[in-house]
Image (cartoon, rainbow, N blue to C red):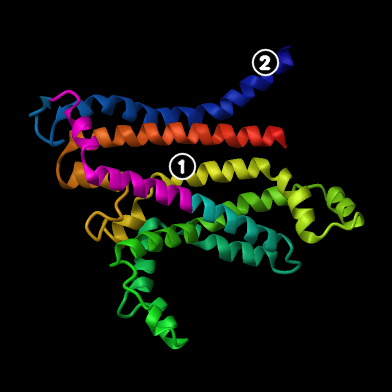
């Protein structure tokens, strides 16, 4: 009993610092800011007017809000699907490389080290319709008809942002999948080979089920991060053209700190917090159940 208590105490000692700072910088500011969503306030002056649910009422009557919610889900869902498929595929390829595994792993991980601001500038130049490398490459291979104003077209701008976000995150999630792949028992793979399984069947029937834990972690992290994308939008499109690429985090910033509608911005932040927490918990529960079923 004493040994069990000592183990629990050791675990709590490791958890406590993270829990303390998470509470101090995330939970506490979130809770104390909720009352501001019931006020009309510019965030600077002492003039605060209690308006009850008006901020929420105005929000749910605003087309801009629904556009932001739609973009938030589009970025989070599509980014999560693409990042996980590509990161898993890249991890499998790197895991099977006999020589240069460390080199390929480091090269693919480099974008993760770049800030969203730097990454946004790089891709803004690449997407430039006049001198960007993407249109130049299309012209060089005779596909001038595919040249586009990548960030000026509302629909293309959304997908251009998604490509940038996916490119940045592949390396991070590849590392998690790579670690999980290297923990798969070699005996199981050798048994599958002896039974005549094809490489695809060996991966799908043996390897993939053993990656369930890594899938849960990667999907949860990529979805959570996808719900709060900010830097790339700020640098590459500023939420435009119009408000077409704006998501909830960027609308909160524009409303609260550019338009000085701090109360309304706080109401938007409360809705984003609720959506993110509910969807993350539901998603994590579904994926955890899949781990047990496997």
The answer to which image quadrant residue 115 occupies is bottom left
Mark 1 to mark 2 CA distance (whole Å): 34 Å
At 62% from the left edge and 20% from the top edge, which residue is drawn?
A: 9
Q: Which residue is mark 2?
A: 5
| 66 to the left or right of 81 | left
**Where does the C terminus fall, quadrant-wise?**
top right
Residue 129, x across and y down, in percent: 31, 76
The label number, if any, that marks residue 247 in the structure image = none
Classify 10 Å Cα crowding around label 1: few (below 14), some (14-19), many (20 and above). some
Front one among 268 and 6 = 268
Classify 10 Å Cα crowding around label 2: few (below 14), some (14-19), many (20 and above). few
Residue 113, x across and y down, in percent: 48, 58
- Magenta includes 75? yes
Q: Which residue is mark 1?
A: 224
**Where does the N terminus fall, quadrant-wise?**
top right
Mark 1, secondary structure of its residue: helix
Q: Note whether residue 249 is visible.
A: no
- Magenta includes 43? no
Residue 212, x across and y down, in percent: 67, 42
Residue 292, x across and y down, in percent: 69, 32
At 47% from the left edge and 52% from the top edge, which residue is drawn?
A: 78
Farthest residue, direction left: 47
Q: Note whether residue 279 is visible.
A: yes
Q: Earlier in the sequence, mark 1 or mark 2?
A: 2
Report the predominant secondary structure element of the magenta stretch: helix
The answer to which image quadrant residue 260 occupies is top left
Residue range highlighted in magenta: 51-78
| 248 to the left or right of 8 | left
In the displayed structure, would residue 274 be above or below residue 213?
above
């Amino acid at each position: 009993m004493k040994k069990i208590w000592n183990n629990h105490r050791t675990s709590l000692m490791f958890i406590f610092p993270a829990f303390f700072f998470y509470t101090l910088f995330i939970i506490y500011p979130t809770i104390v800011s909720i009352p501001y969503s019931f006020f009309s306030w510019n965030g600077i002056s002492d003039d605060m007017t209690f308006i009850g649910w008006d901020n929420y009422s105005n929000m749910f009557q605003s087309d801009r809000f629904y556009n932001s919610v739609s973009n938030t889900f589009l970025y989070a869902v599509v980014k999560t699907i693409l990042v996980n498929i590509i990161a898993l595929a890249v991890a499998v390829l790197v895991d099977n490389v006999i020589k240069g595994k460390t080199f390929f792993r480091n090269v693919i991980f480099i974008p993760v080290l770049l800030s969203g601001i730097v990454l946004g500038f790089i891709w803004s130049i690449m997407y430039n319709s006049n001198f960007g490398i993407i249109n130049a490459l299309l012209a060089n291979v005779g596909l001038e008809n595919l040249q586009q104003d990548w960030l000026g077209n509302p629909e293309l701008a959304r997908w251009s942002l998604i490509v940038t976000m996916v490119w940045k995150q592949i390396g991070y999630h590849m590392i998690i999948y790579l670690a999980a792949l290297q923990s798969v028992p070699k005996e199981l793979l050798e048994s599958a080979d002896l039974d005549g399984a094809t490489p695809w069947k060996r991966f799908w029937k043996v390897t993939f089920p053993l990656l369930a834990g890594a899938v849960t972690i990667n999907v949860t992290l990529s979805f959570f991060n996808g719900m709060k994308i900010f830097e790339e939008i700020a640098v590459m499109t500023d939420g435009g053209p119009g408000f077409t690429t704006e998501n909830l985090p960027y609308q909160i910033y524009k409303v609260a700190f550019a338009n000085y509608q701090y109360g309304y911005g706080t109401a938007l932040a409360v809705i984003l917090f609720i959506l993110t927490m509910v969807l993350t918990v539901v998603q994590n529960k579904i994926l955890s159940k899949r781990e047990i079923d496997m």
